Amino acid sequence: GAGVSQSPSNKVTEKGKDVELRCDPISGHTALYWYRQSLGQGLEFLIYFQGNSAPDKSGLPSDRFSAERTGGSVSTLTIQRTQQEDSAVYLCASSLLLYTDTQYFGPGTRLTVL
Amino acid sequence: KQEVTQIPAALSVPEGENLVLNCSFTDSAIYNLQWFRQDPGKGLTSLLLIQSSQREQTSGRLNASLDKSSGRSTLYIAASQPGDSATYLCAVRNSGGSNYKLTFGKGTLLTVNP
């Protein structure tokens, strides 16, 4: 079946512009997660959704970052007024259940802020 | 705060060798541990997930062990092939507090030479 998909695969933007990154989880997966992988850094957890709810937003790097999920399915990560340090690969994952299941990752969106 | 360390950071072996990748974590209170593979420019592929109550998991030429009390896991790859070349990531999910996210190591870059 279809895995987690993300779009766009690559995004180049100018500093100060807003960007939206999209994630389509595996159908039926209730939990959805966003991570960031910066050059030379490990994967950094950003935010998770249980259904449409994001109980903990403390992992978001700044208030320029926001995320939403609608219909228990598609999620959008929005970065406002992008900065060069936002350049990274943004990975989305989903799992059937929140706490114990395998997380399945999408291919990621590579964001480059010039 | 959970910290995950992977040793070595990089490993190069000739085809056919058996090899071991190491992962250690500082907080033994975990739900599970997951090994992933990441190919250049791609997302993460889940290889094995070990629940905290388990000691090991096997899939084909891969065997992962878990010693929760000592905070260690190993990924054993038998009869390595050039197609095994990738970055291997270890991630743990804590059993308390922020138990919805994975904490990743920085990975081991494996190169299998023909």
Image (cartoon, coloured by chain):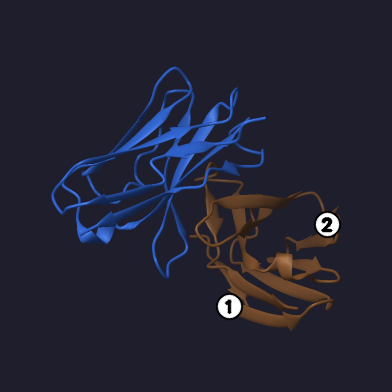
Chain colours: A blue, B brown
Q: Residue A111 location in percent, x, y?
A: 33, 52
To which residue does mark 2 refer?
B56
Q: Say what amino acid the circle numbered 1 marks.
A: Ala
Residue at the image point whose x is 44% and y is 35% from the top: A23
Instruction: Looking at the image, tell me whether mark 1 or mark 2 is earlier in sequence order.
Output: 1
Quarter of the figure that contains the C terminus of chain B:
bottom right
Circles 1 and 2 in contact, beta carbons < 8 Å: no
The image shows residue B9, relative to residue A83, as above or below, that is: below
B61 left or right of A39 in image? right
Q: Residue A5 location in percent, x, y?
A: 51, 36
Nearer the viewer's eye, disc 1 or disc 2? 1
Q: Chain of mark 1?
A: B
Q: Say what amino acid the circle numbered 2 marks.
A: Glu
Q: Residue A46 location in percent, x, y?
A: 40, 47
Question: Can you tell which mark lies on residue B54?
Answer: none
Q: Is residue B75 visible?
A: yes
Q: Residues within 10 Å of mark 1 (few under 14, many from 20)?
A: some
Q: Quadrant of residue B68?
A: bottom right
Instruction: Determine the residue located farthest toward the front in the rendered image.
Output: B114
A89 left or right of B106 in image? left
Q: Nearer the viewer, residue B6 or A80?
A: A80
Q: Nearer the viewer, residue B58 or B51?
A: B58
